[in-house]
Amino acid sequence: MNTIDIEKVTRINDVEDAVTYLYESIPSSEAIENALQFARKAHANQTRKSGEPYIVHPVLVASIVANITGDEAMVIAALLHDVVEDTHITIQDVERDYGSDVAHLVEGLTKIDAIRDAQLIPSHSDEKLVVSALSFRKMLVASIEDVRVLVVKLCDRLHNMLTLGALSPAKQHRIAEETLVVYAPITQRLGISFLKNLLEDLSFSYLFLEEKRAIDMYLEENYRSINARLNAFCEKLTKMMLENGFNEDDFEILSRVKHHYSIYLKMQRKGISIDEILDLLAVRILVKKPLDCYRVFGMVHLNFQPLSSRFKDYIAIPKENGYQTLHTTVFHESAIFEVQIRTYDMHKTAELGVAAHWKYKSGNNNPISLDWLHNLQYQNESVEAFYELIKNDLYSDDISVFSPKGKSFTLPRGAVALDFAYAIHTEIGDSAEGCLINKEKASLLTELHNGDMVKIIASPKKITRCSWIDAVKTSRAKSSMRANCNQRIRMIDTESGINIITTIFHLNQSRINELFSQTHLEEQRHRIPSELDLLKETVNRFTQEIRTNNRFRAFLARNRFKVKPYVFAALEVYANTNIGDVVFDYCCHPKTGDEIVGFLQDGKAHVHHKMCKNAAAMIDRHEPMVFVRWKAQHYYRYHLIISMQSAQGSLADLLTF
């Protein structure tokens, strides 16, 4: 794997130096030379904010791409990535001169810029960037068909971040935030770990200045002790390997300190100081064969005391992006070390992710689909729900769980069995009514652990669980459950609206539906139970419609349809008949502020929670209903007394009900 000299790339601001570095990264070819000369001509009179010639930027982006992928088409696309936008050259011209593969990549890169312009708020706006950046990322992943396009764009973003110092502080903050929200998470899912770490740390240095200074200060103050610990541990590991049959050429040991942004995230997520981070110090042992990984793992555990529950086998169960490594954490001389064990090939995949498909597998120049990456976006998802994806799916540790047939599923740590059901398929999640975890019956809200085998028991019909939305972890589950809940509420509101109007006019439901159609109010029916003005308008419109029919004159003469208010403590009821009292039925006991419905029985309004099962049955039977709402915000203290069977698991069943 070629290494990118980040310090060297940052220092280059001269065209000839940039070209020299490009040809150090990839052998020269006629196509690359033609693209280079064309790009130099196209950007001849352009400069960057720093004052350096603009052509330096695409040449260095091409160099970074060359180091990562070694793919000629991607390098040429990097050289030309701004040409279509900045000149009269078209995609057709690019295809004619450089072939369909390069044209396909350049078109994808141009499309990203178009999406960015459409989705991101303008720089002069006071609106918080993160909201539009999330929408941008969602559109990006949904619309880009070839993953190579994203890899080139990520390299482009890396060079922009390396040269961010020439911009104003406001633009630095804006671009850094966009990088952290949009590009770094995508890099993580693509598995290009070294690029992810660079983008995160560069963004971190602009967004969290004080926090970065504090981490820098700690690492500087403890530099000698940290290096001494790492060196001593590596020496002991080397000795262990040599004494157990490995030759010096059979393995390599790399040591590191966790990168800055990763330290910051762990401190924030766990509410701990930097001293308390268990895996601050880490070593990586590279060997030749997968079997050697397990040999080394056994040796490490026999020679150093391991921390329980800190072992992860990503070789037998790889991550979705292809990452394979054994992880464990051990003690050595009062220090704690994370140990990662992998083969050299696994190391290439871990560092380069999807880029390893081109650099290390010959003859693979075909566009690679982003289908597996599409778990970054879901249909009909709000920005708030998408933000949950950042918090839960992207910046949390993963666990792997299994179906009864042995298929593995990757979920964020803390996911419950219902998350697993939705990971299988949306329909399975919608109809899940129970589960078996490791062949034992369990609640759907049981938290899953690495290696669990889960079987979902499905119902023949969809089950709506509005109160469980906050209990699940993944955005797939949350968004599906929220959509089901909204659909169910709209249906209840629609039927309630029809029933309220039916009660007011004392007509059968078929006639009421005719009136909705004749007055073109069908699409407003779901708003009637919550909007008093619309209720009154509907009554007036229906009355006028009925007056046009001679058959109903006598009916109008003996009936009054004007609704009147009746106030009872914190509740208002509107009806065209006398309401003597309001009662809360025993089945659901709605609290102040809950969504409610009201039924007319014996001159009283019987109030239920909108999601009450008994209320749903009464709505389906078209029982008489009235408009009811809370008068104002009142606060009450409630005492809850629960009588339950004294049996093992009863309390757990209650808490997950």
Image (tube, helix red, strand yellow):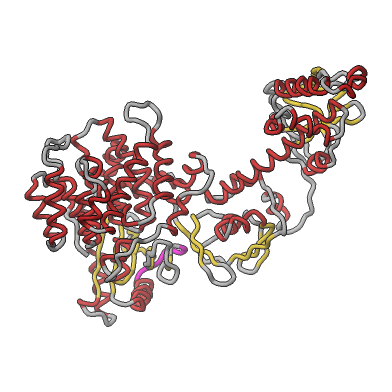
Considering only vertical position in the picture, is 448 above or below 642?
A: below
Q: Vertically, is 586 above or below 187?
A: above
Left or right position of 602 against 101:
right
Q: Quadrant of residue 584?
A: top right
The x, y position of residue 572, in whole percent, is 77, 22
> Measuring 39% from the left and 61% from the top, which residue is drawn there?
321
* Count of all numbered marks drawn on residues in the image: 0
Compared to 533, does 352 lie above or below? Answer: below
In front of the other: 2 or 231? 2
Is residue 64 or residue 504 the one in the foreground?
504
Image point (22%, 65%), residue name: 1
Instruction: Confirm whether residue 637 shows in the render.
Output: no
Residue at coordinates 37% horizontally, 67% vertically from top-left? 325
Is 144 magenta? The answer is: no
Give the residues drawn in magenta, as a range.
304-309
Q: For this view, does 145 lie left or right of residue 537?
A: left
Q: Name the one closer to the observer, 257 or 227.
A: 257
Question: Is residue 495 shown to the viewer in this render?
Answer: yes
Residue 306 is inside the magenta segment:
yes
Residue 255: x %, y % from top left: 25, 61
| Relative image position of residue 119 (x, y in whole percent) | 39, 37
